[in-house]
Amino acid sequence: MSNNTTPDRNLIALALTWLVVLLPAAWGVSQVVLKSAALFR
Amino acid sequence: MAFDFLDRSRSIAPANYDRWRVPPAALAIHLAIGQAYAFSVFNLPLSTLRGITASAPDDWKLSTIGWIFSVAIAFLGISAFTFGRWLEAAGPRKAMFASACCFAGGFFVAALGVQTHAFWLVILGYGVIGGIGLGLGYISPVSTLIKWFPDHPGMATGLAIMGFGGGAMIGSPLAVALMEHFKSATDVGVAPAFMAMGALYFVFMMFGVFTVRLPAPGWTPAQPRDASGTRRTVLAPAPDVHVNSAIRTRPFWLLWVVLCLNVTAGIGVLGQASPMIQEMFPGVIGPAAAAGFVGLLSLANMTGRFFWSSLSDVIGRQRTYMIFFAAGAALYAGVPFTGRAGNVVLFVAFYVLIMTMYGGGFATIPAYLRDLFGTMHVGAIHGRLLTAWSVAGVAGPVLVNYIREYQLAHGVPKAEAYSVTMYLMAGLLLVGFAANWWVSPVDPKYRFKTGDTV
């Protein structure tokens, strides 16, 4: 592995690990926001 | 051995490992076990397992079903207390794996209980086995992140514990969608939904198990340089205190009271949020708007966990709790006024603020413990402290329900029945203010000394 590719791979690994948890979390938050909208209708 | 990869030694990070890859591992565990907060979505379907469209005479009563969540929270505290020392020694990977097995296994056993209509199996599965998974999964990621972020311990623990608050937001719509998918003319779909959730959460938690890392001994984060070019120094934790010594100190018990009162004040109202807003604003707020209010409170609970614990890194833990207790008491005392004035927006705003501080109380406590007792046994000490949550989990709802029923029985109108509860909550928070005021550094005689038994 060359030194040039290592930072990129680390960055991709970092982005992927966050994506795995942020995607379901974002879905959950969007569900709540949609439901909360009923309060202000 | 096939399970060698779970060993503490195998989870030590290599040099130059990016510490920002660790919080997602913690979040994966907390987002999963946070599903517990959403268990109430199963309550109604569980009460119509036989009758399907309505409760049959041999269906379980809602009051009976309520015990499943209570037992799970009680076992969260018991397992955090019992296994806290073990998980510090075993390392986060093994503890998270055990948590995933218990949490998912609990769902599977509970599914069997639902299928055979055996309530004791549901209690054993979700309540006892699942509850043990909750306790193991709650404290292990927190103590790991504290070790990775000595410069931002509040923010780090807030990040993980925010996941626990957010878990309900995933768990609730997921459960509804799964039950909808599996239901038929003869089945409400709870058992297959339990099986599916057990499997899904197990896979999700395994992501945390495989990605979690511990910093190498002696590792410290590189600090950015300030304007003068010198590196900022990391705020050192307090000298280490052994867990067995920690629970003999006055600060530990004061923090126990602080957590217990902060949770009691919030949890009782959280459980009653939907009927409360409808009864305080009759004819204005219906069931759909009340559900929106509950959703907004969970969002406030979640964001408060990150916001307040991060702020505590800047203004200090003791000051943060001063704000919680002083502002919380003022807001609770002001809630009846918003009801009498018929001001829904102000009522919602007051409760949103209260809920951010309720969540913030949970999220800031591990960093407070780290400031007082060091990092060596912070997970185990946190586990001991969580018994305050178990006590508050029972005391809060009982207090709110009992006072409300007493008021109604004595002819107080429904819209006014919550006023006394609010004033009582304000009073409890003032006691919490005093307890927090009294917290002081740990007596040096309790410090861990080289040569002591770990």
Image: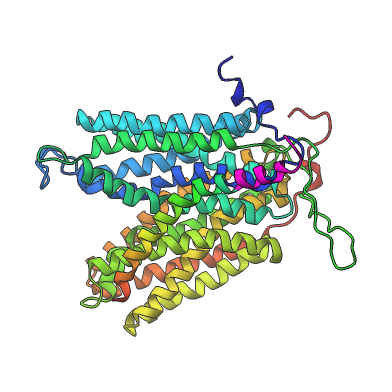
Which residue is at 80% across, 42% downward? B445
Locate residue A9, reporting x and y percent.
65, 42
Up the image or down, B353 lies above or below B215; here it is below
Q: Is residue B175 left or right of residue B326?
A: left
User: Tell me, what colour scheme is on the image?
Assistant: rainbow
Q: Is residue B38 left or right of residue B243?
A: left
Q: Nearer the viewer, residue B169 or B134?
A: B169
Start and end of the magenta stretch?
A: A1-14
Q: Outermost residue, top direction?
A: B1
Tell me which secondary structure the magenta stretch mostly adopts. Answer: helix
**Is residue B382 something one can see in this rendering?**
no
Determine which quarter of the picture holds residue B182.
top left
Which quadrant, please, contains the N terminus of chain B?
top right
Locate residue B288, reporting x and y percent.
25, 66
Q: Is residue B280 left or right of residue B90?
A: left
Q: Nearer the viewer, residue B337 or A31?
A: A31
Up the image or down, A17 lies above or below B428; here it is above
Which residue is at 63% across, 28% downward? B90
Which quadrant, please, contains the C terminus of chain B?
top right
Which residue is at 49% across, 52% downward? A22
> What count of labels does the image hold?
0
Q: Is residue B117 left or right of residue B264?
A: left
| Magenta span includes A13 | yes
Determine which quarter of the picture holds residue B350.
bottom left
Locate residue B390, reporting x and y percent.
46, 45
Q: Nearer the viewer, residue B406 or B69?
A: B69
**Is residue B262 something one can see in this rendering?**
yes
Locate residue B285, reporting x and y percent.
25, 73
